[in-house]
Image: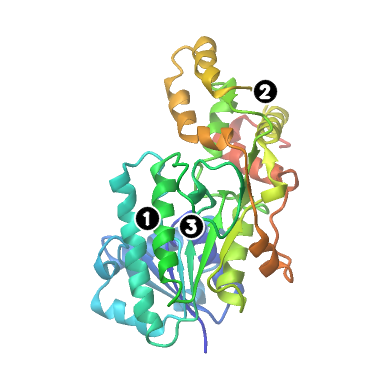
Amino acid sequence: MNEVVFLTGATGFIGGNIAARILKRNPRTRLIVLVRGTSTDEASDRFWKTILTIDPEIRPGDMRSRVSVVRGDIASTNLGMSRSDLEKVVEETTHVIHSAASVEFNFSLEEARVTNCTGTNNVMATAKLAFEQGRVQRIGYISTAYVSGNREGTIYEHELDHRCGFANTYEQTKNEAEQAVRRLAADLPIVVLRPSIVIGDSQTGITTSFNVLYAPLRFVLQGLLPCLPGSPSTPLDVVPVDFVRDAICHITLESREGIGKTFHLTASENAATTREIVARTVEFFNETMEKRRVENVHFLPANGFRLALHQSRPGSGAAEKLISMFESYLCHHRLFDNSNTNEILKETAIRAPRFEEYYRTILGYFVRSFWGREMKKAA
């Protein structure tokens, strides 16, 4: 039986990478992708634009016959699909990967719940209908390692604790959604996949989203953040999207193990510290730029950071607002145990590389995207 993957979030960063990987490496696998749009043509254009941004070497050509772009919205009943599209998904799907999510940190709780909770419930309801047809082998739900919220210390894959609270509504609603998904795991072949902070491709540097890690680093390189809150020894768990993509595809589409389990797709013991990430970024920037130069930042306790920032950079409201959204990631010491992931990937070549192994590729794409004209010719 040829595989038919129903994928949500295919115009997003992780979902788009999953789609591109399947198209290139799984030639007998078909995709049904749910995409928002005012028309099917617009939805299709959005999907292929994402794919070609992620992998410019892809030549759609014959690949188009393997992709059904379905117009819809996960926040709507039946995912906003037409009756015929719903029937197609239910009758043909063998695997489900739910990647769509709202990743905004500053949404209200009600706004975040629309996509992350209601949307996930709707996707799971459709997945259940498809499972009842007898074809669905596995349902992959992409959560986040940060369902752990404000916890510190070692965080295990089976845990889903909310007693320490959350840094933002993204974390809280992803925690709530994962709880709902886990309640279905007794009846459905579910795997839960928890990436940490996902950055560009370790081989190309390509990203479609300059958020999370990139945003504060950009402020550092613009000289707007001479200091950062937290300890320089805090581990910052970042992973390249190609590792996340390959792990998700292996666990969801290729492995016969893992149903009912949760997998941390994280750097874990190999996570770089905030000091290393910032220092390597500043060093790379200074060696590749023609005229610009930025000083390395220093770290301060969170309660002294704002005063120091105001004193050194009057009118630094934008930088302070940005850092307030990311402060918990800079200040909380946590280690994501990834025993389940290591076990299921042990016979593969899939692993999370150390930041030192790929940072120049990531930073090269980042710096070219914002300061390309100012870089040295040889850079």
Q: Which mark is residue 143?
A: 3
Residue 328 in picture, x, y percent from top left: 52, 35
**Placement of 216 over or under 148, stated as above or below:** above
| Relative height, residue 95 to residue 296 (above, below) | below
The residue sitting at 61% across, 36% down in the picture is 367
Comparing labels 3 and 2, the label whose residue is closer to the camera: 3
Q: Position of residue 345 (x, y in %)?
A: 69, 67
Residue 136, x across and y down, in percent:
45, 81
Distance between mark 3 and mark 2 Cα atoms: 34 Å
Q: Which mark is residue 296?
A: 2
Horizontal side of 81 relative to 246 (left or right) equals left
- Secondary structure under tag 2 reads loop
Residue 376 in view, yes or no: no
Three-letter code, disc 2 = Asn
Rounded to the nearest angstrom, the CA distance separating label 3 from label 1 is: 10 Å
Judge by depth and name the residue closer to the eye, 23 or 118.
Answer: 118
Which residue is pictured at 71% across the width and 48% down the height?
269
Question: Nearer the N terminus, badge 3 or badge 1?
Answer: 1
Which of the marked residues, 2 or 1, is nearer the chain's N terminus? 1
Residue 116 is marked as: 1
